[in-house]
Amino acid sequence: MNSLARYTLSKKERLKSRKLIEQLFREGQSFSVTPFRIIWMFTQSPSPVLQAGFSVSSKYFKKAVDRNRIKRQMRDAYRLQKNTLMEKLQLEQKQLSVFFIYTGRVLPEYSTLFDKTGTALKNLIKNFHENTAANT
């Protein structure tokens, strides 16, 4: 990790646009890294280079406290590890929207979320490069 890097997740970097989220679910590509399902898509919006959204199903977590805790931990794990993906996107001059859905059925440990988020971001970089290579 770069010592000068800022590990922030600003409001602009959060995926909030209902229209963009619907387009992401309709047209985006997805893959799974247990306990996550990741949906991603390149965008052309005048938004930041990388936007992310997070979701936890109320089917398995009835209490909002549990859902909010998992989302907060997912955002924190993502915030600390997103810089390599952001650098790759800036080099390629691409914009990416990504949505993390927690599909597990038990309350996770933070260390598990951190490790799996790192794995998911590495897979995202790999898929990003495969997709870029296929388009050229």
Image (tube, rainbow, N blue to C red):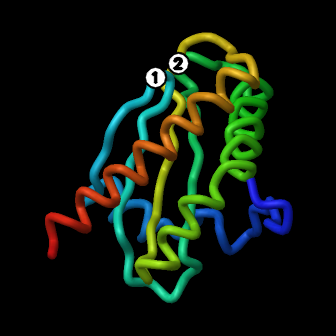
> Helix, strand, or loop for circle 1?
loop
Give the mark toward the camera: 1 or 2.
1
| Residue 120 percent across, percent down from the top left | 48, 39
Residue lying at the far front in this picture: please name it. 2
Instruction: Check residue 104 in the rendering and tell me which mark sits there, or answer none.
Output: 2
Q: Is residue 57 left or right of residue 76?
A: left
Give amino acid for label 2: Gly
**Crowd class of label 2 (few under 14; some 14 to 19; many from 20; radius 10 Å):** some
Question: Viewed as shown, does residue 103 lie left or right of 80?
Answer: left
Q: Quadrant of residue 3?
A: bottom right
| Residue drawn at point x = 24 percent, y = 56 percent | 130
> Is 43 rendered above or below residue 32?
below
Q: Quadrant of the C terminus?
A: bottom left
Q: Which residue is mark 1?
A: 34
Q: Is 98 or 58 nearer to us in this picture?
A: 98
Residue contact at pointers 1 and 2, CB within 8 angstroms: yes
Alpha carbon separation for disc pair 1 and 2: 7 Å
Three-letter amino acid code of the residue under disc 1: Thr
Q: Position of residue 44 (x, y in %)?
A: 38, 83
First reached walking from the N terminus: tag 1 or tag 2:
1
Relative to 128, say whether 135 is above or below. Answer: below
Q: Secondary structure at mark 2?
A: loop
**Label of residue 124 in the image:** none
